[in-house]
Amino acid sequence: MERNIFGELDRKAGLGENAAVPAETPVVVSDSVIRKLRLIVGDENVLCEAAQLLVYECDAYTLEKRLPGAVVLPQTTDEVARIVKLCAENNLPVIPRGAGTSLSGTVLAVTGGVMIAVTRMNQIVNVDYPNRRALVEAGVVNAWITNRVKGEGLLYAPDPSSQPACTIGGNVGTNSGGPHTLKYGVTTNHILGFEMVLPDGQIIWLGTEPDGGEPLEGYDLRGAVIGSEGMFGIVTRILLRLVRAPEGYKTMLGVFESVDDASQTVSDIIGAGIVPGALEMMDQLITQAIEEAYHFGFPLDAGALLIVELDGLNAGLTAQAEEVIAICKKNHAREVRTAKSEQERADLWKCRKRAFGAIGRLSPSYLTQDGVVPRSKLPEIMRFIQSVSTKYGLRIPNVFHAGDGNIHPLILFDDREPDQVQKAVQAGEEILGKCVELGGSVTGEHGIGIEKIDFMARQFSAETLDVMMALRRVFDPDARFNPHKMFPGAKRCNEFILKKRAAA
Ligand SMILES: Cc1cc2nc3c(=O)[nH]c(=O)nc-3n(C[C@H](O)[C@H](O)[C@H](O)COP(=O)(O)OP(=O)(O)OC[C@H]3O[C@@H](n4cnc5c(N)ncnc54)[C@H](O)[C@@H]3O)c2cc1C
């Protein structure tokens, strides 16, 4: 017997039959269930027409697509709990969803089922300025929080590039990072506690409570849920930590002839004991696309650009910036520009954070990879990516969180060409395999989803995977929440879709 959660558990729960069903056959959400869903949330908050469901057929990982049986848009925790109970009674898969910006297929409705999108639960419930924390609903968009509190000199630190769209619930689902998490940490470091609806419909609170109550002694289940990709329950309200905005910034742009020189600079800056707020790299191809789209004034012939942002108390920032400039120069930087105004700094970040959006200038489709290598291995992985690009004849621009060793190769292809789709998938797999070989990881922040399930067994031992699955069973004994994600043996539809494309 195969040792995976979809073997042992599914037989008990009945989902095993679903698991044995070819991926082409989705679980049916009956008319009677649809009627009951409408009674809970109102007609306008239940979507089940094919045209309405199309919006929900995938996330930002667009290689695999599947329509859910219904999408429900609750507005309160009580509604979420009632929907979840109804799904439990009818043994239906549940897919929690935020804005659907995941890049690894974490919200794909592989078996159909009921998608619960929390985007209408979008209130910042309150901000506790003296204690620097905020209580928000799960559908609140990440950027809204800093926008709300910046006037008081505070900010919410995790800043994924998707922050104008992605939700805090989704950030909890994927333990999201961002450029400034080099210094400030990722989502888990900024979530004090949250309310969650368990797969049986119970409402619980994990971690610090909003009234100030500290968690009872025991396991850090808050930490276990963060990054569990919607497999443990639906998070509905979240208590966040706010941090004081830095007094000052020094934001620099290092212009290098080669990725190697820029990579060495990254290692040397950290080696010198400097921890910038952010340390981001862009290679030549992505720089050219960004420049064409946003006209910042980037040099088009540079081999690589480094954005180095120092932040903190004004006293000392200038001296530290001089040290950074010296390190850049030692590594043959052609020039180092410093943002002269807040506007210039904001424009630079706008370009960086909208980099993926500029890809449309280069290619009809792209696959974003997300791997991690030790910082010292950056030159090696970048050379490897170049060799993969040559091998498959696909262009691969790079824009990434260099300070964390978190790479984002963007594999360009044309999804109308089945051969190119196959090559893009293979190229991505080779790059991730190399990350593991170099002592890194197959994800830094985008999660496993369906995209990387096959890599889990390469990165973790069977025993470790068993423990992860056992933990999942504690929360979701029936394996109904966001099924067919993350664990080896989980079904994916990529292969049959690719086959269909090849046959078309
Ligand atoms: C242009 C672009 C740039 C990006 N940049 C970054 C980046 O810098 N850093 C980064 O980390 N990611 C980045 N991402 C990926 C993505 O934005 C993040 O993973 C984000 O956290 C997803 O949030 P979402 O609201 O879109 O969640 P979704 O994509 O809807 O869901 C993501 C996961 O969370 C689960 N989930 C959603 N809501 C809940 C809930 N309420 N309770 C429980 N589980 C839930 C889902 O089931 C799924 O597993 C980027 C994506 C794009 C398209």
Image (cartoon, rainbow, N blue to C red):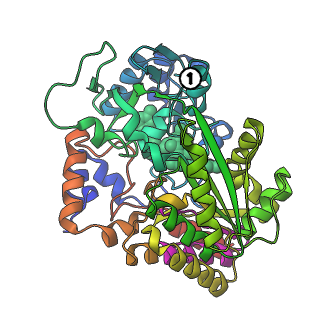
Q: Is residue 421 one of those drawn in magenta?
A: yes
Q: Residue at (66%, 85%) from the top-left corner? A: 390
Q: From this viewpoint, is residue 330 visible?
A: yes
In magenta segment, residue 122:
no
**For residue 252, above or below residue 194:** below
**Does residue 59 appear anywhere in the picture?**
no
Give whichever of 478, 233 is nearer the camera: 233
Q: Residue at x 82, y 64 (%)?
A: 299
Residue at mark 1: 153
Q: How many marks?
A: 1
Which residue is pictured at 61% across the width and 73% down the height?
331
Determine whether, in the image, residue 75 is placed left or right of residue 289: left
- Vertical relation: 234 (above or below) 78: below
Q: Relative to the observer, which residue lies in front, 177 or 467?
A: 177
Rendering quarter of residue 428: bottom right
Which residues lie in the magenta part? 405-432
State the image coordinates of residue 422 (x, y, percent, origin top left).
Answer: 60, 76
| Identity, as a three-letter code, of the amino acid under mark 1 | Gly
Q: Is residue 160 above or below residue 409?
A: above
Pick the quarter of the image with the C terminus: bottom right
